[in-house]
Image (tube, rainbow, N blue to C red):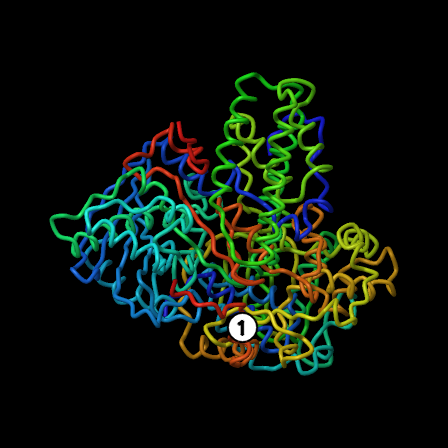
């Protein structure tokens, strides 16, 4: 990370890494979708639809190619006729409305033939080193039907309905990084356009959105014939792509402590830089106020039926009212305006509102913070190698610094270890079970770093402070993963959750939201404590309208004039 | 079957865990198998051979009892436990070689020697009974095939990687080895029940909306 002088330090990991706060994160200008759209616009990427071979039943394939400065990437899409009873977002589903692969380059007929025999099968098929991602999507039945029926009748769809749902299809998995035979990340990590995290996956979803817009028009035309209306581009812009995500994503942030640290630290560094500004120009202050008003409009479209999120939205709405009052009464140009705002938020707002402001204050300062996006990937494989020469006392200190809150917990008390993470043999689905009610302990995954830290710390008590940790590890291989994490913690201050991931009250959706917010997702809609729907790319320009003036603030809807 | 190195790593981790290794050693097994495959070696066969020996039934018998300069036990050493120790003790190589006696599937020591080489920013050589391997942590050169068992392995600083094996971005595991790894991996998966199907993943609402 380049050094920019900051008077205000980054926030303390003990404050940031609580699950309730991570479960209140919002997208920001460092988010992976916005990084991608900015880059594609800056580099003048071109987009072509080279195949759209879909029949009157909506079945067939299409190819969309994005050409960057050095590489082309092609979404190969397959559209299917799915019986309604098979429409499931779960990983155990076996058929979908549409399936996709992101091909590295421009596919030949043979490639498309090969993919047509595998991609529709998803996990049951195989892709190759030429594919960068594998994904699938299901229709949002209500909105799909509404849009098709309206267009076929020669009318435009109702924007209010689009705002409420946000998308015509939602993806239910986007696999990358070598899954099911696809290319490993190492193949692409050194390409500038794919170095930042999840850029191939975000590109795949961006192209998927264009395909879905074209598909709904095609299906409407098949139904309506000559009277069919062309979908108004201004309405189409508010069609994003949904995503439906379960527990599979939650272990990711525990299993990738360096990567997750880099995401959080990038945002914290950006926030520290902005807070350290002594003054803001009239322009910057005006920009912030405008973005805030636009974000309020987006928030007004956010719906959820889940009691926890209903409560959070009520809190957010109260926060929005308080922020609006603050902005009316305060000058944002003098006296460390952004630091004042953040410090005020910590006394006056809930975590939803606090984190919204922490994201929004970055918006006027692309020049100051966007460079930090170059630090969000994890290129430090050596961090996984244990330093066996470290002393027992150094390791104890490393554990205490992150897990002091966990060392005195009674880890045998049922409430503190009520849950256990395991992998079901059914499509290898990650699940969260009840330790004291189900026979799952033998299958428990190492996803309780706090408990494991407490166990290792207790065993370390018997060892001499100056002994090398290698000696301890020779006797206690069961603590090896914990000692590795403790050492990683020394270079990754934001790599560790400061909460109990197996307590009776843990909310896995907090882990999901933390990750999805960095993708750039909006309108988090939990379906249970471990399942969430989101929206991606709503408001974004389609390829034909992507340019440097549309590439960045699309996530904030323009206010009606 | 042609598989990604990520698949090698994920399968190796589950397999080692399924065979009874701790999570930390399973992580080591995963990285080690991947490293061997990336170097064009048959890492999946090496791990499948090791796991079939079932050394985890009595781990202490297959682990060096202490850190004295010669590492041996009454029984053959496990290359994962011994390799992890080698990586952990990399700094000792600065002062003296490390001698390892009676070790199973000694090819699996190579990735750990590579850890040491990267850490110390120098070449590390391993003299097996009949073969010599040299690595700077990134490349590997071998004078002969490494046997399934070694009476003695001498690990020391020095040497150079003269004819590095070409790197691979994919692995082609022998189907029988891959099956063995997947059978061990299967031991880590909980049998699905109707209850866990509904509750464990938190679904249950209709998605046909």
Instruction: Work out which quarter of the rendered image holds the C terminus of chain A and state it.
Output: top left
Which chain is mark 1 on? B
Give residue A288's position: percent from left, percent from top: 54, 27
Q: Is residue A155 visible?
A: yes
**10 Å neighbourhood of mark 1: few (<14), some, or many (≥20)?**
many
Give residue A506's position: percent from left, percent from top: 66, 62
Residue at (56, 68) in percent of width and height: B13
Check the image and report above or below for A126 versus A18. below
Residue at (83, 63) in percent of width and height: A460
| Figure label count | 1
Q: Is residue B158 visible?
A: no
Q: Is residue A358 left or right of residue A9?
A: left
Q: Is residue A277 left or right of residue A42?
A: right
Instruction: Work out which quarter of the rendered image holds the N terminus of chain A and state it.
Output: top right
The residue beneath circle 1 is B47
Q: Secondary structure at mark 1?
A: helix
Give residue B35's position: percent from left, percent from top: 52, 60
Check the image and report above or below for A469 versus A440. above
Tell me the quarter of the picture where residue B178 sits: bottom left
User: Who is closer to the viewer here, A448 or A463?
Assistant: A448
Tell me the quarter of the picture where residue B109 sits: bottom right
Give residue A308's position: percent from left, percent from top: 60, 56
Residue at (70, 71) in percent of width and height: A418
User: Who is closer to the viewer here, A208 or A82?
Assistant: A82
């Amino acid at each position: 990370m380049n050094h920019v002088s900051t008077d205000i330090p980054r926030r303390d990991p003990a404050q940031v890494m609580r699950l309730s706060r991570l479960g209140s994160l919002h997208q920001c200008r460092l988010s992976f979708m916005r990084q991608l759209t900015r880059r594609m616009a800056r580099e003048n990427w071109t987009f072509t639809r080279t195949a759209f071979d879909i029949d009157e039943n909506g079945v067939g394939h299409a190819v969309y190619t994005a050409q960057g400065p050095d590489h082309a990437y092609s979404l190969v899409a397959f559209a299917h006729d799915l019986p309604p009873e098979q429409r499931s977002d779960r990983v155990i589903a076996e058929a979908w409305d549409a399936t996709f692969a992101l091909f590295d380059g421009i596919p030949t007929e043979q490639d498309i033939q090969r993919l047509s025999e595998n991609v529709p099968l998803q996990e049951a098929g195989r892709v190759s080193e030429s594919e960068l991602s594998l994904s699938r999507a299901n229709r949002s039945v209500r909105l799909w039907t509404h849009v098709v029926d309206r267009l076929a009748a020669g009318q435009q769809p109702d924007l209010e309905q689009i705002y409420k749902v946000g998308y015509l299809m939602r993806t239910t998995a986007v696999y990358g990084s070598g899954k099911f035979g696809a290319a490993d990340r190492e193949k692409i990590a050194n390409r500038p356009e794919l170095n930042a995290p999840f850029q191939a996956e975000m590109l795949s979803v961006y192209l998927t959105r264009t395909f879905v817009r074209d598909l709904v028009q095609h299906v409407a035309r098949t139904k309506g014939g000559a009277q069919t209306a062309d979908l108004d581009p201004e309405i189409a812009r508010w069609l994003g792509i949904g995503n439906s995500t379960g527990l599979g994503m939650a272990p990711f942030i525990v299993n990738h402590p360096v990567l997750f640290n880099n995401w959080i630290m990038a945002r914290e560094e950006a926030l520290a830089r902005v807070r350290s500004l002594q003054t803001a120009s009239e322009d910057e202050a005006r920009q912030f106020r405008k973005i805030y008003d636009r974000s309020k409009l987006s928030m007004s479209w956010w719906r959820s039926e889940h009691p926890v999120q209903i409560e959070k939205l009520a809190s957010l709405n109260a926060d929005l009212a308080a922020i609006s009052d603050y902005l009316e009464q305060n000058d944002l140009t003098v006296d460390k305006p952004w630091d004042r705002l953040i410090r005020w938020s910590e006394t006056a707002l809930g975590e939803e509102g606090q984190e919204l402001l922490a994201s929004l204050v970055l918006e006027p300062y692309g020049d100051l913070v966007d460079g930090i996006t170059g630090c969000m990937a994890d290129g430090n494989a050596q961090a996984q190698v244990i330093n066996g020469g470290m002393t027992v006392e150094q390791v104890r200190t490393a554990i205490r610094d992150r897990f002091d809150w966990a060392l005195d917990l009674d880890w045998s008390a049922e409430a503190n270890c009520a849950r256990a993470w395991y992998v079901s043999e059914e499509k290898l689905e990650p699940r969260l079970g009840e330790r004291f009610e189900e026979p799952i302990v033998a299958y428990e995954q190492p996803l309780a770093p706090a408990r494991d830290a407490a166990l290792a710390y207790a065993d370390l008590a018997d060892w001499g402070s100056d002994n090398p940790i290698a000696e301890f590890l020779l006797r206690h291989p069961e603590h090896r993963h914990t000692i590795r994490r403790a050492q990683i913690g020394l270079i990754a201050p934001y790599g560790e959750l400061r909460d109990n991931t197996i307590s009776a009250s843990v909310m896995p959706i907090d882990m999901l939201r933390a990750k999805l917010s960095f993708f750039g997702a909006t309108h988090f809609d939990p379906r249970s404590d471990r399942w969430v729907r989101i929206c991606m790319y709503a408001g974004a320009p389609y390829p034909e309208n992507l340019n440097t003036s549309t590439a960045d603030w699309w996530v904030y809807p323009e206010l009606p004039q | 079957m042609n598989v990604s190195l990520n698949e090698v790593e994920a399968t190796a981790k589950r397999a080692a865990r399924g065979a009874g290794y701790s999570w930390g050693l399973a992580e080591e097994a995963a990285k080690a198998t991947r490293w061997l495959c990336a170097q064009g070696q048959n890492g999946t066969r090496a791990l499948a051979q090791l796991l079939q020996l079932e050394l985890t039934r009595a781990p202490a018998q297959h682990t060096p009892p202490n850190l004295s300069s010669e590492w041996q036990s009454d029984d053959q050493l496990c290359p994962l436990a011994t390799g992890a120790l080698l990586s952990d003790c990399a700094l000792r190589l600065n002062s003296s070689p490390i001698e390892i006696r009676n070790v199973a599937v000694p090819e699996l020591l190579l990735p750990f020697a590579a850890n040491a080489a990267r850490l110390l920013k120098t070449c590390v050589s391993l003299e097996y009974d009949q073969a010599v391997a040299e690595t700077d942590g990134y490349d590997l050169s071998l004078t002969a095939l490494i046997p399934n068992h070694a009476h003695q392995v001498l690990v020391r600083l020095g040497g150079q990687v003269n004819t590095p094996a070409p790197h691979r971005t994919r692995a082609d595991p022998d189907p029988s080895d891959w099956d063995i790894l997947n059978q061990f991996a299967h031991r880590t998966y909980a049998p699905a029940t109707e209850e866990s199907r509904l509750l464990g993943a938190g679904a249950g609402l209709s998605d046909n909306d």
